[in-house]
Image (tube, rainbow, N blue to C red):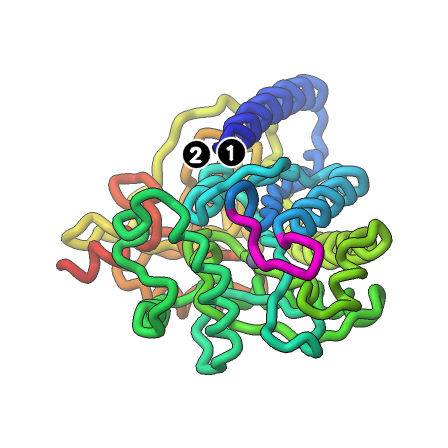
């Protein structure tokens, strides 16, 4: 269990190593040249084939959901890898193994994924129900969406000690889903953009029935901290769709539709936020921490809006950040992160993010404590207990 996750990590480390070497070489080559090279953002895309191993997922008349999910996930990843040089694809599983929902989300979070795409196939009691739908995290009053969430979340019952791991969350009890009303999905806009792209592609290019973009309390999306979607590629309880999803051609159509949507999303965001390196790429890399500008709250906690990352250190000047003056640098292990604003209240950061979204559409809120980025949920808990 989870062995491919470890391989994924090793792969990541290798890629970082190779990337640092390239950066060093580039820096050496560019030394003395006045024009700064344009730094392309590397996108980390985690593709998650739902279910696996002892968890077959939904059952069709002659297929298991887990196999369809895996085939489509691998093809989608292959298309992304082949076509986009600035994308690093990681799979939560690339074979038939069981992985818990929390492990899937943790894997994406640890690898600092920019996108999380979970691939599933749907189930309905009636054979006539058909079509594709893409979910983002959120609370919906729609009973059908709740049903999908319950079905997809139910897999945690196969995990050891699931009640403790998921803090008493009962996937079958509607009351458990109330906790999702407390969350604010800061990636809602981006997730919706990607989800709409997928549904568009399904409808216009793959000729599938489009049941739309929906919201539901899906645990795996709840636990990831990046734009995340869960795709239901069709109903394996409908004979036509089952046949389609089991066929090589059907799987290729679905995978290429997901690929195109992801590609378009990435190029859209890239267009708006090209990262340019600072004037002197050979500048000594210093281990820096967040610059103190505002007095921190009593908890030492502050909320900022991460606007961009760079492999090179950038001089903190408004013209380097599209006119934003209040920028701090956060040195993380692999790259420089730049965050704007400095707020004691989370809601102030939310308001501020809205103001600068036109400049940085991919901006998101981070919590910083003792000069370290901490998980947002932890920060929210800290502000609550205060
Ligand atoms: Zn599923």
- CB within 8 Å, label 1 to label 2: yes
In this rendering, the answer to whether 142 lies above or below 162 is below
Single out the residue that lies furthest toward the front. Answer: 61
The quarter holding residue 353 reads bottom left
- The image's mark for residue 332 is 2
Most foreground residue, 235 or 2: 235
Q: Residues within 10 Å of mark 2 (few under 14, many from 20)?
A: some
Write down which quadrant ligand 1 falls in.
bottom right
Most foreground residue, 143 or 370: 143
Viewer can see residue 36 = yes
- The image's mark for residue 300 is none
Q: Position of residue 320 (x, y in %)?
A: 56, 47
| Magenta segment, prevailing SS (helix, strand or loop) | loop
Figure disc tally: 2
Judge: label 1 CB < 8 Å from ligand 1.
no
In this rendering, the answer to whether 347 lies above or below 317 is below
Q: Which residues are magenta?
A: 55-65
Q: CA distance from mark 1 to mark 2?
A: 6 Å
Q: Position of residue 126 (x, y in %)?
A: 63, 77
Q: Looking at the rendering, in which quadrant would you find the C terminus?
A: bottom left
Most foreground residue, 193 or 339: 193
Q: What residue sits 51% from the left and 57% below the top?
A: 363
Q: Position of residue 372 (x, y in %)?
A: 32, 39
Viewer can see residue 271 = no
In this rendering, the answer to whether 307 lies above or below 194 is above
Q: Position of residue 366 (x, y in %)?
A: 39, 52
**Mark 1 = which residue?**
335
SS at circle 2: loop
SS at circle 1: loop
Q: Is residue 159 magenta?
A: no
């Amino acid at each position: 269990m989870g062995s491919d996750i470890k391989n994924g990590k090793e792969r990541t480390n290798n890629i970082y190593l190779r990337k640092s070497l390239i950066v060093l070489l580039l820096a050496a080559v560019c030394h003395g040249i006045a024009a700064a090279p344009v730094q392309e953002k590397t996108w980390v895309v985690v593709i998650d084939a739902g279910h696996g191993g002892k968890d077959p997922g939904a059952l069709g008349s002659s297929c298991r959901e887990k196999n369809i999910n895996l085939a489509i996930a691998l093809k989608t990843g292959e298309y992304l890898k082949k076509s986009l040089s600035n994308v690093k694809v990681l799979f939560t599983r690339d074979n038939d193994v069981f992985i818990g929902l929390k492990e899937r989300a943790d894997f994406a979070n640890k690898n600092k994924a920019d996108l999380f795409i979970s691939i599933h196939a749907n189930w309905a009691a009636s054979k006539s129900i058909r079509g594709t739908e893409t979910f983002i995290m959120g609370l919906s009053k729609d009973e059908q969406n709740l049903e999908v969430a319950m079905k997809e979340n139910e897999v945690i019952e196969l995990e050891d000690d699931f009640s403790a791991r998921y803090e008493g969350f009962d996937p079958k009890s509607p009351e458990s889903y109330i906790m999702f009303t407390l969350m604010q999905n800061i990636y809602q806009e981006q997730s919706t953009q990607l989800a709409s792209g997928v549904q568009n592609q399904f409808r216009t290019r793959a000729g599938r029935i489009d049941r739309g973009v929906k919201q539901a309390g899906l645990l795996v999306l709840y636990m990831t901290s990046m734009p995340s979607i869960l795709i239901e590629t069709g109903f394996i309880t409908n004979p036509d769709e089952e046949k389609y999803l089991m066929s090589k051609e059907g799987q290729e159509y679905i995978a290429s539709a997901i690929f195109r949507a992801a590609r378009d999303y990435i190029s859209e965001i890239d267009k708006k936020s090209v990262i340019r390196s600072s004037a002197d790429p050979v500048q000594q890399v210093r281990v820096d921490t967040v610059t103190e500008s505002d007095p921190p709250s009593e908890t030492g906690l502050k909320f900022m809006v991460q606007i961009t990352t760079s492999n090179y250190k950038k001089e903190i000047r408004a013209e380097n950040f599209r006119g934003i003056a209040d920028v701090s640098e956060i040195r993380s292990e692999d790259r420089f992160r730049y965050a704007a604003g400095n707020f004691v209240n989370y809601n102030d950061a939310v308001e501020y993010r809205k103001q600068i979204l036109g400049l940085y559409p991919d901006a998101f809120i981070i919590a910083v404590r003792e000069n370290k980025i901490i998980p947002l949920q932890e920060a929210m808990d800290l502000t609550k207990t205060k």
